[in-house]
C-alpha cells in the first residue's frame, strides 16, 4: 500500500494546521451563536459541547494508546533483532576456523546493512536498498549454512546455527512490516473532524451566553493540537523526536563483537 498524504506530511505542520482550523471554527461558532442570540435574546437555550468533548477525549486517548503500543512494539523488535544477530554470530564459532572466518565476514557486512537500514531515516529509496542488501547477505549466510550441513562433521554446528539464522531472517520481515504499521488515517481524520466540531460548538455556546473566555478556549485548542502532535510523532519513529535511537544502539554495539582485523 502506497504512503498517503498524511504520512508524507510533517507532524508539526499537521498540528499547526489543526490548531489554526480550530481557532477559525471557534470564531465561526462564536459569530453564529452571537447572531442567534441577537435575533432571539429571550431564548437562552443553547447546546453544550460536553457530549462531543467526551467523544473527542475518548478518541484522543484511544489513538494515543494505539500509537504508544506500536512504538513499544517497534522498540522491542529492534532489541530482539540485535539479540538474534548476536546469537547467530556467536554460533559461527562452532565451525572450523576457515568457515568461521567467512561467516564472521558476512555477519559484519550484515550488521552494517542493518545499521544503515535505520540510518536511512525517511528516505524510502535508501530503506529499500538497505533492506534488499540485508536480505541478500542473509541469503548468503543461509546458503553457506545449508551447504555445510551436508558434512556430518558440522552436524552440531548446523543444529545450532540453522534455528538462529532462521530467527534472524524472519525478524527482518517483522521489523519492516512493524515500521509500516500506522494509526489508520480514517481514525485521524475523524479525530480532526471532532476537534474542529468541538471548537465550533464551544464558540457557539459562548456566543449564545454573550461572552467567551478566549484564553481558555485558545488554550484548549492548543492542548488538543499538542496531544495530536505527540500521537503522530509516536507513530513515526523514523522522523519524530521520539525515535528508536536508544534501542537501535543495541545493533550498533554489535560492532564490538568483531576484531579490528576482521
Image (cartoon, rainbow, N blue to C red):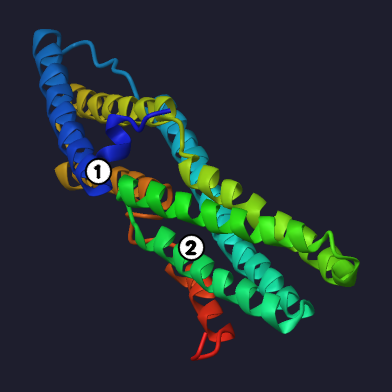
Q: Which x, y percent locates residue 262?
A: 52, 84
For label 2, the residue is 114
Say if 236 sits above or below 6 in the image: below
Q: Which x, y percent locates residue 60?
A: 44, 39
Tag 1 secondary structure? helix
Q: Is residue 197 left or right of residue 94?
A: left
Q: Residues within 10 Å of mark 2 (few under 14, many from 20)?
A: many
Q: Nearer the viewer, residue 31 or 111?
A: 111
Q: Is residue 236 left or right of residue 170?
A: left
For label 1, the residue is 15
Q: Which mark is residue 176?
A: none
Say if 62 sits above or below 74 in the image: above
Which residue appears at 60% of the width and 68% of the height? 82
Q: Is residue 38 left or right of residue 60?
A: left
Which residue appears at 30% of the width and 50% of the height? 123
Instruction: Point out the image quarter for the N terminus.
Output: top left
Tag 2 secondary structure? helix
Amino acid at each position: 500500500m502506497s504512503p498517503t498524504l498524511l504520512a508524507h506530511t510533517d507532524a508539526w505542520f499537521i498540528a499547526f494546521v489543526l490548531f489554526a482550523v480550530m481557532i477559525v471554527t471557534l470564531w465561526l461558532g462564536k459569530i453564529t451563536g452571537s447572531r442567534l442570540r441577537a435575533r432571539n435574546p429571550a431564548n437562552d437555550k443553547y447546546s453544550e459541547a460536553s457530549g462531543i468533548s467526551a467523544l473527542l477525549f475518548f478518541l484522543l486517548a484511544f489513538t494515543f494508546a494505539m500509537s504508544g503500543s506500536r512504538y513499544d512494539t517497534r522498540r522491542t523488535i529492534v532489541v530482539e533483532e540485535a539479540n538474534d544477530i548476536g546469537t547467530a554470530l556467536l554460533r559461527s564459532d562452532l565451525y572450523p576456523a576457515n568457515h568461521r572466518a567467512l561467516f564472521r565476514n558476512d555477519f559484519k557486512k550484515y550488521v552494517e546493512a542493518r545499521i544503515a537500514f535505520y540510518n536511512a531515516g525517511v528516505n524510502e529509496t535508501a530503506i529499500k536498498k538497505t533492506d534488499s542488501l540485508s536480505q541478500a547477505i542473509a541469503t548468503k549466510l543461509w546458503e553457506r549454512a545449508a551447504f555445510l550441513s551436508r558434512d556430518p562433521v558440522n552436524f552440531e554446528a548446523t543444529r545450532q546455527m540453522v534455528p538462529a539464522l532462521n530467527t534472524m531472517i524472519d525478524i527482518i520481515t517483522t521489523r519492516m512490516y512493524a515500521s509500516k504499521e500506522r494509526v489508520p488515517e480514517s481514525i485521524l481524520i475523524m479525530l480532526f473532524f471532532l476537534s474542529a466540531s468541538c471548537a465550533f460548538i464551544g464558540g457557539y455556546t459562548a456566543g449564545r451566553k454573550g461572552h467567551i473566555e478566549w484564553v481558555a478556549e485558545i488554550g484548549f485548542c492548543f492542548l488538543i493540537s499538542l496531544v495530536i502532535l505527540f500521537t503522530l510523532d509516536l507513530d513515526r519513529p523514523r522522523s519524530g523526536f521520539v525515535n528508536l535511537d536508544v534501542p537501535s544502539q543495541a545493533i550498533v554495539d554489535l560492532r564490538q563483537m568483531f576484531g579490528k582485523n576482521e
